[in-house]
Image (cartoon, helix red, strand yellow):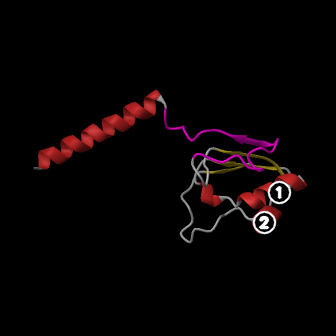
Amino acid sequence: VISFHCPPTQDGKPLITNESIAKMKPGVYLINTARAGLIAEDAVLAGLKSGHIAGFATDVYAQEPPAMNELYLHENVITTPHIGGFTTESIENATGVAVENLLQYLQKL
């Protein structure tokens, strides 16, 4: 299993290409919850069709809202909305940080 949690590459090129997939063990699972640009979708689809990639899961898309395509409709693909940060805890934490930052700024005036 390879799971992506990183920013996009500086040159904007995907990390997952036909070449990188060929170096992976057959039966690999790919999970992308980082940035859509990290994955060359055509390469992932080809890997799924050949059986080299066993499954792909993503919650990030090159186009929002995502247009259904052959990759997203593949039987070994799971797609979900990019809502991992929408938990009660994360919203409370973000609100607390924002208020603290505002108070610190106002104290400097």
Label ID, residue 74: none
Magenta-colored span: 65-86
Q: Residues within 10 Å of mark 2 (few under 14, many from 20)?
A: some
Query: Which residue is farthest front?
Result: 67
Picture residue at 32% right of the left edge, 40% below the top: 97
Figure check: 93 above or below 48: above
Locate residue 17: give its quadrant. Answer: bottom right
Query: Magenta segment: does it hold 67?
Result: yes
Q: Are marks 2 and 1 in contact (CB under 8 Å)?
A: yes
**What is the three-letter code of the residue carrying label 1?**
Gly
Query: Which residue is farthest left?
Result: 109
Sequence-wise first label, 2 or 1: 2
Picture residue at 73% right of the left edge, 46% below the top: 72
Q: Residues within 10 Å of mark 1 (few under 14, many from 20)?
A: many
Indicate left or right for 40 with 81 as reference.
right
Residue 28 image offset from top left, x and y in percent: 80, 51
Secondary structure of the magenta portion, mostly? loop
Looking at the rendered structure, the secondary structure element under dot 1 is helix
Residue at numbered disc 1 = 47
**What is the three-letter code of the residue carrying label 2?**
Asn
Mark 2 vs mark 1, CA separation in Å: 8 Å
Picture residue at 83% right of the left edge, 52% below the top: 48
Query: Which residue is farthest bottom?
Result: 11
Locate residue 12: give its quadrant. Answer: bottom right
Residue at numbered disc 2 = 18
Residue 2 image offset from top left, x and y in percent: 71, 51
